[in-house]
Image: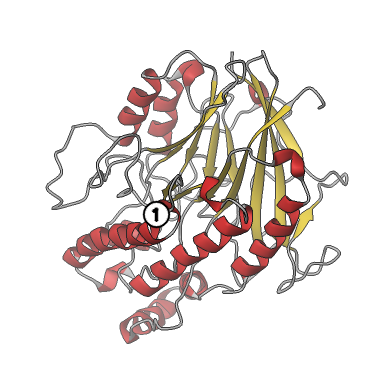
Amino acid sequence: MSDWVPQLQILHISDRHNGAPAFRPPIAFYQFALALHRLSPDYAARLLTAVVPHDPFAIDALAAFVREWCADDPSWEGRPLWLVDTGDLTSFGDDASVELAGAQLETLRRALAPNEPERVEVLALYGNHDAWPGDQPLNLRSEAIDSHRSRLREAIDSRNARSGGATEGATSRISPVAAANGASDREHRSPWRLRCEPDDPKLPGVDLYGLNTVLHDRWRSFLAVGELGGDRLPGSGEPDDGLDQLSRLAAQIAADDERPRLRIVATHHPLHFPPPRPTVMMHLANDEEVGRRLTTLGRRGVQLALAGHVHQFYPRLGELPAASRDAHFPPLPVGSVPLLVGSLSQTSLAPTGFNHQAQLLRFFAKPGEARLRCRRQLIARAGGQLSGSGAFGRFALVPTAVGAAYDEIEFDLA
């Protein structure tokens, strides 16, 4: 790849499920879990597993890995670097845990670029667990859920103001409240965009759009069901422009110049659920509609879809198609690829056997051509399955089944 130029790195994490030491779940939660156990032991076990605070040391272990690893690769020095978190920052959405999650993002930001952390751009979404107002939503009134929605966003944005977003020259979008694309400080609507615009006009650009899929609704939040639609704070006094998130995404893309661009969306709920897609829980309720509307964008549409939520690395390492034209992951448009990452810190083993994971995406461009290559690497605390790693030890790169350090896919942006 000597004629391919390093262009952009993205560290993608998800589903940290923080539990601050100061937070204690209410007795009503455990009473509910006990009653649920009598009806469905399996679902009660799922509920409890999802809310158990995950390993608080995983962030420091990942920070140590990326600090050493990035320092050993000077070819990427000075290149754009993004940190993307696709949600479930916490288990219960309580203020103390949200605050802890923001501090952890700052730890990672500084590890990625110790000498110039201000160049690391951050975009973090919240997940369905963050929408819980300190208890599972069926125990609460709708008014408490609406109030928490406003408080959640402002709490995360306050963390942003004290970290990357407050550093001169830094860009950090840790909540929808953060200004983006010239929006005011009180702009609550998504999508929120990160943009890589190389100085060399012969190189394609990369845009990443954060979209909210979390529903602040008692039953659907409890069932972890999402939807990609409108996104406006109740009672905010914010004018309704009559557009949903996908309409605003289409308008932003239509306003772009003719420069070839790779367009990425980041959501908490996957737009393509790893088969088999559930019908009652966990899924994105309007995924078919989202797929149809993304298809209408044509060649200027979305080529990559980052997500978390299912605590699974997908597609499996080594199984990416070599070229985007061969990608078929319905309901995403043909040529669009979902990239999911498992929990950074969950306590029990994920289906892959790697219980703590992150993914590093490296993008390479070929000057004068409308092509980009995305190289995907899995970073994991692999439960002792890899040399030098352990369930509570160091992170390591996971090789593919044939021993390669990565897999990659090429995008034709012409």
Q: Is residue 270 left or right of residue 378?
A: left
State which quadrant residue 339 falls in.
Answer: top right
Q: Measuring from the top left, give residue 396's x and y in whole percent.
A: 77, 59
State which quadrant residue 187 falls in.
Answer: top left
Q: Measuring from the top left, give residue 208's x and y in whole percent.
A: 48, 36
Quarter of the rendering occupied by the N terminus = top right
Q: Dot 1 lies on which element?
A: helix
Residue closer to the observer: 129 or 174: 174
| Residue 61 drawn above or below residue 228 | below
Q: Residue furthest bottom?
A: 27
Q: In percent of the image, x 36 and y 38: which residue is there?
A: 191
Q: Amino acid at mark 1?
A: Ala
Residue 355 visible to an observer of this rendering: no
Q: Is residue 78 left or right of residue 124?
A: right
Crowding near the residue tagged with mark 1, few <14, some 14–19, many ≥20 C-alpha atoms within 10 Å:
some
Residue closer to the observer: 134 or 312: 134
| Residue 228 drawn above or below residue 133 | above
Which color scheme did the rendering employ for the protein? secondary structure
Quarter of the rendering occupied by the C terminus = top right
| Residue 352 drawn above or below residue 400 | below
Residue 9 visible to an observer of this rendering: yes
Q: Measuring from the top left, give residue 198's x and y in whole percent.
A: 57, 26
Q: In percent of the image, x 53 and y 52: which residue is there?
A: 308
Q: Is residue 124 left or right of residue 261?
A: left
Q: Measuring from the top left, give residue 342's x and y in whole percent.
A: 60, 56
Residue closer to the observer: 220 or 214: 214
Q: Is residue 71 left or right of residue 46?
A: right
Total residue callouts: 1
| Residue labelled with disc 1 | 166
Residue closer to the observer: 122 or 350: 122
